[in-house]
Amino acid sequence: MKNVLLLYPEMLFYKISIFNKLSAFLELNGYKLIIWYRKIYDPNKECTFSFVQETNMTLKNYTRIIKENKITAVIDILFKKDPGYFFYFFSIFRTKKLHVPIIFYGQGIDKQKDQWWRNILYNLTYFMYDGIILYTPAGKSKIWKRFHYKITCANNTLDIDNIKIDEDRDQVKSKYRIDSTKIILTTGRLHSRKKIEILSDIFIKNYKNSPDIAWVLVGPGLSDEVIKAIKGIKNIHFLGPIYDRKKMAEVFSIADLYCVPGALGLGIVEALYWGLPVLTMAVNHGPEAYYLRDDQNSLIARDKQELEQMIQNILFNDEKRLVLSGNARKVFFEEATLDKMFEGFNLQLNRFFMSPEPENNSAERTIPFNTKYKDETISAKY
C-alpha cells in the first residue's frame, strides 16, 4: 500500500463525502489517501479518510509528516492565500529533496486571468511539478504541450447520486410555497460575476405578472440592488443559502431549467444530473463549463437580449426542453460521475507506481466505485 498525502487547506463541506469515497476507491487500487487540512467547514460530518491532525502548515511540519507517514506521493491543490505562495513554492523543492513525486491538482490556468505573463508563470510552475491532475480536459488549452504527458483529468463533480427525494414534485413545491407550474432555478454564490441582475431584469420585465412561472434563487451573496428589485414579487423565491444536500436536491427536482447569466461553476453538475437545460451567456466560466454542449444540453447567449429570447423559447417549447434534458443526463453519466473523477487520480498515481497491489490481494482492482451508474437508465427529466 502506497501512502499519498493530499494538501487541501480548506475542507469545504461538500468535499467531505467525495474524499470519503475517493479514499475508499484508491485503497482498492493500492493507495492510502491521507489528507492534510487546516480548516473544515462541517466538523460534525464523518470523515472516513485518514487525515493529519496538524493545523499549522509549515515546511518543518510538512517534512515531518512526509517522513512519519512514509509518504510516497504528494498531491497539492493550490490555495494561493492559505497557507500562501511561500509555503507552496518551497514545498515543491522540499518534496523533491525527499525524492517524493509532487502532483498539482486544480483547474489549470485561470481563463478569467488570462494574461501572457501569468501563463508563463503558471507553466514555469508546472515544469517543477512531476504530475498534473486537472479538473477537466479544457484546462490543457493554456498549458504548454511539452507538459501534456504529465496530465490526467479528474473531472470535477459533486457527490449527488445517492440522494433520493421522498415527495413528489407537487409536495416539494408546496413545502417551499411555490405554486407555479414552470420554474427557473439559479444557484451558487450569487456574487457580481454571476450577473444575477441581468436575469432579474428579464424576469421582472416578462414574468412578474405571470403566476405560472417562478424564479427560485438559492445561495449567499445576492446584491442589495437585486434584493430591492425583487422584493414583494410573489413569483420570485429567494431561499438564501442552502447547505443541506437533500434540500438542494429537492429544489433542483422541481425546476424546469437552470439559468445563470454570468460565470457558472459546479451548479452545472447538479443541473445536468437533474436533467435541467442550462441557459447562460458567453462569458468566462469556471472549468465545469466543459460539460456544456451548446444547443444540445444548454443554450449559450451572446447578450442579454438573446438570453431573454432563449428563456421565452425554452419555457414554452416542451419538445425542445425534453431533448435538452435527455442530453443533460447523458453528459452527466458520460463525463461527470465520481468514477470519472476518481480514475483521473488513479491514472496519475499509476504513472509513478504502476498500480501497486492493494493490501487485500484478493480485492478487485480499478473497480468503479458507483457501480449502479453502469446500469442506470439515462432518461430525460420529463
Image (cartoon, helix red, strand yellow):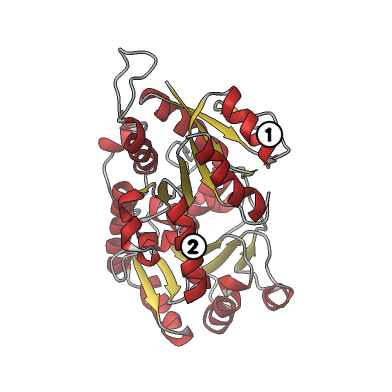
Q: Position of residue 185 (x, y in %)?
A: 51, 63
45 over 272 or under it: above or below: above
Residue displayed at 26% across by 36% down: 374
Q: CA distance from mark 2 to mark 1?
A: 26 Å
201 over 38 or under it: above or below: below
Residue nearer the viewer, 84 or 235: 84
Q: Earlier in the sequence, mark 2 or mark 1?
A: 1
219 over 226 or under it: above or below: above
Helix, strand or loop status at disc 1: helix
Residue displayed at 45% across by 49% down: 129
Residue displayed at 35% across by 53% down: 381
Name the residue carrying label 1: 61
Amino acid type, label 2 = Tyr
Q: Can I make out residue 81 in this image? A: yes
Q: Can I make out residue 232 in this image? A: no
59 over 150 or under it: above or below: above
Residue nearer the viewer, 39 or 44: 39
Amino acid type, label 1 = Asn
- Name the quadrant of the N terminus: top left
Name the residue carrying label 2: 122
Q: Position of residue 102 (x, y in %)?
A: 48, 42
Residue nearer the viewer, 272 or 318: 272
Q: Residues within 10 Å of mark 1 (few under 14, many from 20)?
A: few
Helix, strand or loop status at disc 2: helix
Quick check: 66 left or right of 348? right
